[in-house]
Image (spheres, rainbow, N blue to C red):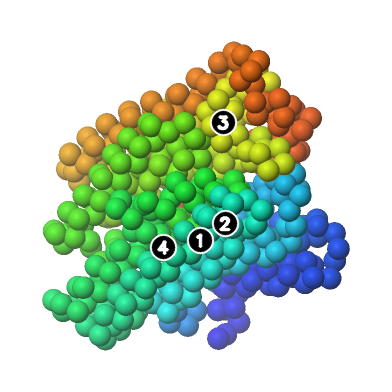
Amino acid sequence: MGARELIALLPIILISVSAVLAMLATAFIKSESAPAYVSAIGFVIAFISLFVAYPELPRAVTPLLIMDYFSYFYIGLIILAGLAVSLLAYPDFKKRGVRQGEFHVLLLLSVAGSATLAASAHFASFLLGLEILSVSLYAMIAYDRPDIKGLEAGTKYLVLASVSAAFLFFGMAMVYAGVGTMDLAGIAVNGIGGSISALAGIAMILVGIGFKLALVPFHMWTPDVYEGAPSPVTAFVASASKGAVFALVLRYFTQAGIHDTGALAYVLLAVSIASMFIGNLLALLQENLKRLLAYSSIAHLGYLLLLIAAGGRGAFIAGGYYLAAYFAAIIGAFGIISALSTGRKEPRMLDDIRGLAWESPWLAGFLSAMLLSLAGIPLTAGFIAKFYIISLGISKAMWWPVIMLIINSVIGLAYYLRVIAAVYERPQKELFNAMQTGAEAGKISLISGGVLAVLSVITVILGIYPPLLLKIIERTL
């Protein structure tokens, strides 16, 4: 590997080095803050390195990784998501009284795995990135050991993720047996050539990917894991871990021309529409905030799956914009739940945030911005993101899927507005639960408040001036 390849790989190298440094800081420095500082600084330096290494792109780094503008865009999103989660986790775990050094090591490793996924060009790097990400998530979800719900969520994710990994491994073996290569670009461009073995392998790979993206019918783990994990971890699972897998799927499924293959495109459309309806309808029934957001995330991945069924250049543009908007909104929503927690008590139910605006109007405003963006209301990034998906669907004459998306957006608006209405409702004293203990302005961490403010500003700016992000996305094509 030459110097130019090493420079192109610099962001992943720096994240990996930061993980080692955070581990050493955890072992040899008594301060709980040291690993958190290492983590945050590591993310910042890794993000800056994207601009340093940019002139070397595009460049293949061994047959396993392709470091190009597309992968750098998603690696940048993942690094920023990791930074936000790191900053939100520090005050959250401090309130819980949980030793957090190991958490930041795990977070850095999971970001390294996610970045590897986004740059994968081979089954080997796909599996390597996926397992680094998954093994880190097992421990992160169950990190707060005294929390029984967290241990239960971690165990469920471990068992079900292991099953999905088995499907992926066996599927990849069958594709290799039928095609004779593990190079993703080669498989995407040349196809499977009518091989029954390869076709069965592709089906098994789709099952594994469906689990990782929490698509129907592989979604049942999502609400339990989201509810049981600490809120900063849930934010990472909902954003970066799914975004990395989707980036890989978007690149190679679009290259393979899935939208032109007939039967498989119809399967993707069916899964997409089922994910929209089941996610949104089940979210309507929820009083638990984290479960509500879990089901809504299933619906959002259903929206994104339409892009793969549509294909073309527009799929890359709409996918990049949608994921950026979704990252900001979902991390912000879970970040607010984290900021409102006191000790081990989180505002889990709708009643726990009823009247938040009367105690902390800034937090109420931040939460409203996040939920309105997830709902796709004008002047938020979520509206522009959905607009691009609808525009792409119309340009491809996908009338029924577009109609389904619009109907589901209306359903989603109902439960998002229900939460916002509760936030601005004047509370009765006996219902003033979480606000009495966690929402007083003086008890909200300055770090958490700063992160939430930045995410809210991003959500609004991208909704008012889309070219700011569009110009960056267009350079990835």
Instruction: For residue 277, say whether it is visible.
Output: yes
Instruction: For residue 51, say whether it is visible.
Output: no
Which amino acid, by three-letter code, is at mark 3? Leu
The answer for how far apart the CA atoms under marks 3 and 2 are is 28 Å
Label 4 crowding class (10 Å Cα cut-off): few <14, some 14-19, many 20+?
A: some
Which amino acid, by three-letter code, is at mark 4? Leu
Which amino acid, by three-letter code, is at mark 2? Leu
Q: Using the image as rendered, state which of residue 222 and residue 321 is in the foreground.
A: 222
Q: Which mark is residue 160?
A: 4
Badge 2 element: helix
Which amino acid, by three-letter code, is at mark 1? Thr
Q: Is residue 446 above or below residue 213?
A: above
The quadrant of the rendering that contains the N terminus is bottom right
Label 3 crowding class (10 Å Cα cut-off): few <14, some 14-19, many 20+?
A: many
Q: Using the image as rendered, state which of residue 399 and residue 197 is in the foreground.
A: 197
Q: Which mark is residue 151?
A: 2
Residue hosting label 1? 155
Residue 237, image x, y percentages: 51, 54
The answer for how far apart the CA atoms under marks 2 and 1 are is 6 Å
Residue hosting label 3? 367
- Foreground mark, 2 or 4? 2
- Foreground mark, 3 or 1? 1
Badge 1 element: helix
Name which quarter of the figure residue 436 lies in. Answer: top right
Q: Are marks 3 and 1 in contact (CB under 8 Å)?
A: no
Residue 340, image x, y percentages: 66, 34
- Foreground mark, 3 or 2? 2
Badge 3 element: helix
Q: Residue at image x 18%, y 43%?
A: 398
Q: Residue at image x 47%, y 60%?
A: 157
Residue 218, image x, y percentages: 33, 55
Q: Are marks 2 and 1 in contact (CB under 8 Å)?
A: yes
